[in-house]
Every structure is written in C-alpha cells, then in structure tokens.
Image (cartoon, rainbow, N blue to C red):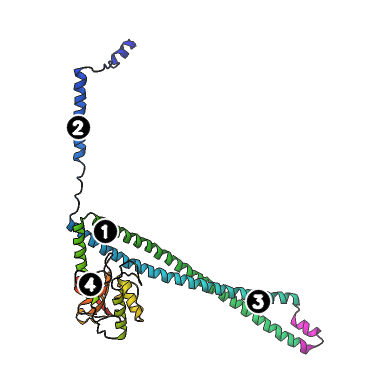
Amino acid sequence: MAAHRRSTHRKPKQRPLTGSAARTAATLALAGAATAGSVTGAGAAPAEPAPTAAQVRVKVDRLYHDAEVATEKYNGAKEEAAAATRAVDSLTDEAARRTARLNTARHALGSLATAQYRSGTLDPTLRLALSSDPDAFLQRASYLDRVGDRQSGLLHGIRRQVSRITRVKARADQETERLAARRAELREHRTAIRAKLADARRLLDTLTADERAAYERAADARHGGGPDHADRAANRVPVAAPNSRAARAIAFANGAIGKPYVWGATGPNAFDCSGLTQAAWKAAGVSLPRTTYTQINAGARVPRSELAPGDLVFFYSGISHVGLYIGGGQMIHAPRPGAPVRIAPVDQMPFAGATRVA
C-alpha cells in the first residue's frame, strides 16, 4: 500500500522535445526574452542630451567664477596658515629660551644645595657660642642669610619659569591645531579649484573650433579683451594719480599687463586678481591683505561716482574679484585662467564697491 502511494506522487519522466515541438518551444523562449528585454529597457532613463554651445558657455562661465571664489578662500587660508606657522615658530623659540633659563636656574640651585650640604648645618647660636672670633662668625652668618635669600629667589624664579613655559606650550599647541585646520582648508580649496577648472576644460573640449573661438571672443569682451585691447595696452596714457603712491601702484600694474593669470599667484611672473592688486600697492610701499574680501576693508569706501586712479574696485556679490582703477572708467585686472592681465572697462562685471587705500 505504501509503495502504491509513493508511485502515485512520483513526477512523470520528461521526454526531450523533437521536431516541430522543439522549434515551437525555441520560438516562444526567444519571444519571451525579447519581451522581458523591452520591459527592462522601458524603465531605464534616456541618455542625457549633449549641452548646446550656449549651455556650455554658461556652465564654463559659472565654473570659472566658482573657481575664483574658491581661489580667494584658498588665498585666505594660505595667509592664515602662514601666520599660524610664524606663531608656532615664535612660541617654540620662546619655549626653548625659557627652558634654557630654567635649566640655568636649576643648576644654580643645585650648586647652592651641594655647597650647604658640604658646609654642615650647625645651629647659628651654638656656632656663636663656640666661636673664638664672634666678629668673624657674624660676618659668616650675614653671608649665609644672603645665600638663603638667593636660594629663595632662585626657587621663586624656577616656579615662574615653569609656569610661563607651561603657558607658552599651551599657546603653541593651540596654534598648531589652528595651523592643521588651515592646512586642511588649503587642501579642500585646492581640490575644488582644480576640479572646477578641469570641468571647464572638459566642457570647452566639447565645442567645435568655431564655437570655442566664439566663446573666447565673448569672454574677452566681458573681461576687457577684444580687438582694441592691444591698442589700449600699447598706447597707455599717463594717469593723473592723486598722489605718488597711487602713481607707483598704477605703474606696477601697467608693467604687469600681458602676464598670465594663475590662481594663487602674487607675481612677479603671474598673478590672480587680488595678487595683482596686493603686489601693485606693495610696490608703492603699502601692505594690503591677501584676499578680495579683506582688501575691500583695507581703506576708506568710496562711491562709484567718486572713483580716483589707484582705487580698488570690487565685483560680484561675494566680493570675489578686484581690479585697480586707472581713470576714465577703466581698470587693470587679472581676469581669469587663459586671460592675461589687461585693461578693462569697470562696467563689464557686476560692481560691488570700491576702496581708497591711500
């Protein structure tokens, strides 16, 4: 009976398909696979169309602007890192000097202790009673009092030195932490700048030669280039600067015309925008901070209607670009990667403010 139940549940043996039955099964399998493929494909996102030349121009302009913003942040972090490095070095030197003085004081205290140990410690009253020469003992007692005062002074001095060294080392540790944070910022901004410039180059590489040339012409026009740029640079009219320092700053900027834009550069062979203005005013004997957003606070603000040669002119809402005003609605500035230092109209970019340095 059990054998009968097992036999009734056994699966029937599959026989291989042959002839027309096999062909029919193969056709159905291929049809099913095609249907499954079409269903899967229906859910996939269509390929994104390539950007037009106009879209590329907009994206590249934005990338260059963002790279300039990141460049100014990089410049600021670099300046702060340099200041932190100087502070750490100074504190390290101070700690070393104070440690040397501490070691000298400790050595003197050790010498006094050794001398007193060797001389014995008889009670002064007993020494006076036993002494055959009371006057000589009184003289020695006065000397021992002075030695005690000196020992006390040395102890106080050592305590002061230890306390000061502890404070100096704590400040050095704080500056070291600040330096590490600034260096991390430097790496972050450097990576952002390089990525944005690389993206801009990749986008420009998608343009045809004619489209690329059209973009460069338009960008040059926005930043003061174009057919008349060479004429403006070659026929520089002497500027009536308000003072000798402004005249020297403008003379330096004139001498930099044609030199390349390089982010983070302060000369003498390449500049970014704030590097150029800093170097120009340095030539005039004036020390400017490194970044656009600190240079705008380096002097008295002036309205656009009262601009004078030598004034710093700033652009964009984030104060991310700066030039040196030379009069007649013109400035000298370092525009962007691929565009050298040049003369340009002030009204080519969104004006954000102006500062008179001297």
Q: Which residue is mark 4?
A: 230
* For residue 139, side relative to residue 7 (left or right): right
**Residue sitting at x 68%, y 82%:** 147
Identify residue type, mark 1.
Answer: Ala
| Secondary structure under the numbered disc 2 in the rendered image | helix
Observer-nearest residue: 196 or 7?
196
Is residue 345 visible in this depiction of the protein?
no
Circle nearer the N terminus (3, 4): 3
| Secondary structure under the numbered disc 4 in the rendered image | helix
Q: CA distance from mark 3 to mark 1?
A: 69 Å
* For residue 7, side relative to residue 158 (left or right): left
| Secondary structure under the numbered disc 1 in the rendered image | helix
Q: Which residue is mark 2?
A: 34
Of the two numbered discs 1 and 2 in the rendering, the one whose residue sits closer to the viewer = 1
Q: How many dots with numbers?
A: 4
Q: Residue furthest right?
A: 132
Q: Which mark is residue 211?
A: none
**Residue sitting at x 44%, y 65%:** 177
Say which quadrant the C terminus sits in: bottom left
Is residue 59 highlighted in magenta?
no
Q: Position of residue 283 (x, y in %)?
A: 35, 79
Of the two numbered discs 3 and 2 in the rendering, the one whose residue sits closer to the viewer = 2
Identify residue type, mark 3.
Answer: Ala
| Secondary structure under the numbered disc 3 in the rendered image | helix
Q: CA distance from mark 1 to mark 2?
A: 42 Å
Q: CA distance from mark 1 to mark 4?
A: 26 Å
Circle nearer the N terminus (1, 4): 1
Identify residue type, mark 2.
Answer: Ala
Q: Which residue is mark 1?
A: 200
Is residue 129 highlighted in magenta?
yes
Q: Which residue is mark 3?
A: 108
